[in-house]
């Protein structure tokens, strides 16, 4: 009987856990839908601004905007975007692994001399980086709760200032890019300096025959900070969507595992109960036989 009670308690405990994981799966699915809508709404504006900035950069051959200047790299800042909340599988761990792999492979000498620094946007990423001995320059963990546009613009302006003041000659961002509901991929993007090449696929580029009003220099000076703000915002909402997707998949797996475990325990309970009943029948039969004798 003690064994039957123990199995019943285990089944009740796992059912309770399954309720939690199932609820979290539904919550993550709703948040994922909201995050996907954000990405879809941003995409047309992002693509058009990308096209404009890319083509003006190609046409602007006489002026070097400060955001485009390639300097000798003496210090590197790596921004690692993750999540403040757990229960999302390897979401944060993968960011840390990719960030460390990136600096070991791309900046071995700078890393050896202590000139590679990290700026985490995630409590869990920050904790993991510190455990691995990485140098951080504070954190921006509060942003990871909601990824509010105004907060991201403030961070973008901070990163721009660090680059323009020549404190860092290269700023890279490591984050999980949302590809689809079942797939996220860790990406590394060069945030600053901006590439002088256009990645636009529109099939045309501006030529020197175009008249710019105001000048190309003025347009770039105005647009590039906006473009950088938008780039960082896009990265953050991509990471948010990937987080919700990872958590939904993790909770789905946990719920399925709970169902399997409950099924196995139920079979075990039935077998144990049948054994108890059989033993009781044997005992009753033996007692009856003894009374007859």
Image (tube, helix red, strand yellow):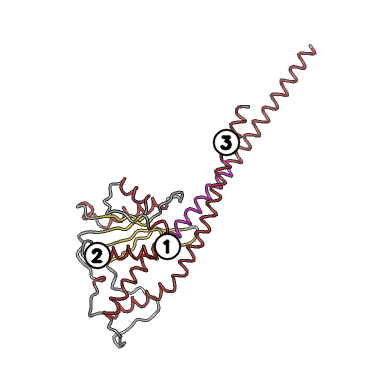
Q: Nearer the viewer, residue 191 or 163?
A: 163
Q: Is residue 171 left or right of residue 7?
A: left
First to last magenta residue range:
239-261
- Gap between marks 2 and 1, in whole Å? 24 Å
Q: Which mark is residue 238?
A: 1
Secondary structure under badge 3?
A: helix
Q: CA distance from mark 2 to mark 3?
A: 57 Å
Is 211 on the left or on the right of 268, as rendered? left
- Whether pointer 3 and pointer 1 mark residues with C-beta atoms closer than 8 Å, the reply is no
Crowding around mark 2 (Cα neighbors within 10 Å: few <14, some 14 to 19, many 20+) is many
Judged by its main secondary structure, the magenta piece is helix
Residue matched to label 2: 163
User: Quarter of the image containing the C terminus?
Assistant: top right
Residue 280's image quarter? top right
Image position, residue 151 (x, y; %): 36, 62
Residue at screen point 41% across, 56% down: 145
Instruction: Give the labeled residue for mark 3.
Output: 10
160 in magenta: no
Q: Secondary structure at mark 1?
A: helix
247 falls in the magenta region: yes
């Amino acid at each position: 009987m003690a064994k039957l009670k123990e199995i019943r308690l285990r089944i009740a405990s796992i059912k309770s856990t399954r309720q939690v994981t199932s609820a979290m799966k539904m919550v993550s699915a709703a948040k994922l839908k909201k995050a996907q809508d954000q990405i879809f709404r941003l995409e047309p504006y992002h693509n058009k601004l990308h096209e404009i900035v890319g083509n003006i950069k190609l046409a602007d051959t006489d002026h070097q905007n400060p955001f485009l200047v390639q300097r000798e790299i003496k210090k590197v800042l790596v921004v690692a975007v993750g999540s403040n909340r757990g229960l999302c599988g390897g979401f944060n761990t993968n960011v840390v692994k990719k960030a460390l792999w990136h600096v070991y492979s791309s900046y071995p000498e700078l890393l050896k001399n202590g000139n590679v620094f990290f700026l985490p946007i995630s409590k869990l990423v920050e904790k993991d980086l510190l455990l691995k001995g990485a140098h951080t320059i504070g954190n921006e963990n509060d942003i990871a709760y909601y990824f509010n546009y105004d907060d991201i613009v403030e961070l973008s302006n901070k990163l721009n200032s660090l680059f323009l003041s020549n404190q860092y000659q290269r700023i890279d961002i490591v984050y999980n890019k949302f590809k689809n509901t079942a797939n996220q991929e860790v990406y590394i993007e060069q945030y600053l300096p901006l590439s002088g090449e256009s990645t636009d696929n529109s099939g045309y580029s501006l030529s020197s025959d175009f008249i710019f009003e105001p000048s190309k220099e003025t347009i770039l000076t105005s647009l590039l900070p906006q473009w950088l703000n938008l780039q960082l915002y896009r990265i953050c909402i991509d990471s948010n969507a990937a987080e919700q997707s990872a958590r939904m998949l993790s909770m789905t797996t946990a719920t399925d595992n709970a169902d399997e475990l409950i099924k196995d325990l139920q079979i075990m309970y039935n077998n144990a109960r049948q054994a108890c009943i059989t033993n009781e029948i044997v005992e009753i039969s033996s007692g009856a036989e003894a009374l007859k004798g």
